[in-house]
Image (spheres, grey):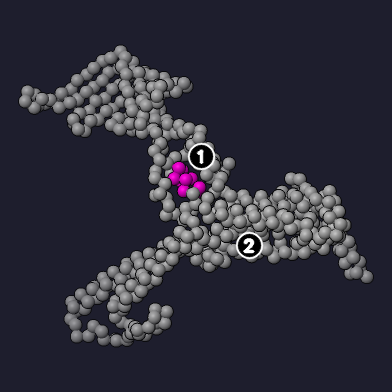
Amino acid sequence: MLFLFKYIDDLIGKGFEWYTILQLMMYNSATNVQMALPLSVLLSSIMTYGSLGENYELVAIKAAGISLRRAMYPMIVVVAILSVAAFIFSDNMLPVANKKYYSLLYDVRQQKSANILPEAVFSNSFPGYSIRVNKKDPDGQTLHDVMIYTSNVADNNTNVLIAKEGLMYKTPDNRFLVLRLKDGVKYDETMGDKNVEPRQRFTRFRFKETEQKFDLGFMKMTRTNENLFTKAVQMMDMKQLKYFGDSTQRQTDKDLTVNYKLFTPYIKYFSVPQKPASAISYKPFKNDNALGGLTLSQQLIALNNASNEVRSVQDLVKNRADQHKEASKSIRKFAIEYQKKFTLSAACIALFLIGAPLGAIIRKGGLGMPVVVSVIFFLVYYIISTIGEKSAKDGDLSPVIGMWIAILVLTPIGIFLSYKAANDSVLFDMEAYKRFFNKLLRRKDA
């Protein structure tokens, strides 16, 4: 639904086949696995163990001498297998799905609208023609007050066709658009014969009915080569991310060395020791009589030259700083996408550690309480991970910390809930809290 709401303007009115939209939705669903899979693991684990607790099956398991940890082993194995499958999917299948999705979405957006003759607007959809239809009937085929302006630059001639009404339809093979026009006139303006009559020639034709045929070849969607999209980080696997990230880092380090050597000669009023860039200390050079011995005009020229040199150095520094900023941003993107290959699997395990003991504690199955609790925990996970990813992209956090901070926050919660569930905790028992506060109030009264 989010996909349809987001790209509805790019899909409606362009005459796509049903399978094109279905392909887009299928590829987009693959890109949403990163959000849907952890939520499904959390919800299913809460529903499963909540149903076991609600039907007193966990009580029977514990009465048979089997601990909750032992009862969770089969599901832990299943979630571990699911996590490995999620990692394989994230590293191998997701880049391919992203490449196909974004390439197809690009072609869809470039496709021209199927409404090639809107009302009261000059349409330039057909090369060499400008067509205006003043009004259309509700059937979408009957036209009124049609004007067709034709321009042939090669022959240096123009003509205009005006008709009171017409009928628009496509040929059976959808290759041509036919306009059957009635009660009109055509004005043709051409160059005269240079040998006989060099003046321009004007011709007028009146007709009761005529047909104009236009090629619809431009309406067919052309596919862009998918390899043009392979340089985006979403279309790379781990090896490619590692390779391009290291290459960009080496190039950035080389540019830093070049920039240091480039700007050193410009610093004329500071003493610059030959040390690494991180250990440089600048000492200002003081000379109160730097322009002494020069005439007024020479001083003005010297100041003007110095000002121009400062501006040029500022522009050069700004350009180099912008290049370094973009390169650093690219390096962070590679690192973030590299960590995403692992966080999907880790999120499944972390949310299972929360969902399974939480279901055993609340002892509610079905789609009521489990959905509410799972959505709350998933929102916490999603908000923390989104903030961490944004901070990592902005350079405020390390890519490793930014991508793993949600897992690091939720894993201790899962361990705590597992401990409370194994010890038959009354964490969500409201009666226990009432008894606790009643005892507390009695003590205060005493």
Name the one closer to the observer, 402 or 444.
402
| Mark 2 nearby-residue class (10 Å; few <14, some 14–19, many ≥20) | many
Q: Which residues are magenta?
A: 97-105
Q: Residue furthest top?
A: 208
Query: Mark 1 = which residue?
Result: 23
Name the one closer to the observer, 141 or 338.
338
Q: Position of residue 257 (x, y in %)?
A: 36, 74
| Image vertical order of residue 424 relative to residue 289, above or below | above
Would you say residue 101 sits in the magenta stretch?
yes
Between the C-alphas of marks 2 and 1, the distance is 33 Å
* In this view, the mark in front (2 or 1): 1
Name the one closer to the observer, 135 or 277.
277
What's the residue at 26%, 20% (across, down)?
186
Would you say residue 343 sits in the magenta stretch?
no
Residue type at mark 1 is Gln
Query: Mark 2 = which residue?
Result: 407
Q: Residue furthest left?
A: 195
| Image vertical order of residue 433 relative to residue 110, above or below | below
The kind of secondary structure element at disc 2 is helix
Name the one closer to the observer, 99 or 290.
99
Residue type at mark 2 is Ile
What's the residue at 8%, 27% (across, down)?
194
Q: Earlier in the sequence, mark 2 or mark 1?
A: 1
Q: Position of residue 13 (x, y in %)?
A: 46, 33
Viewer can see residue 377: no
The kind of secondary structure element at disc 1 is helix
What's the residue at 45%, 59% (across, down)?
240
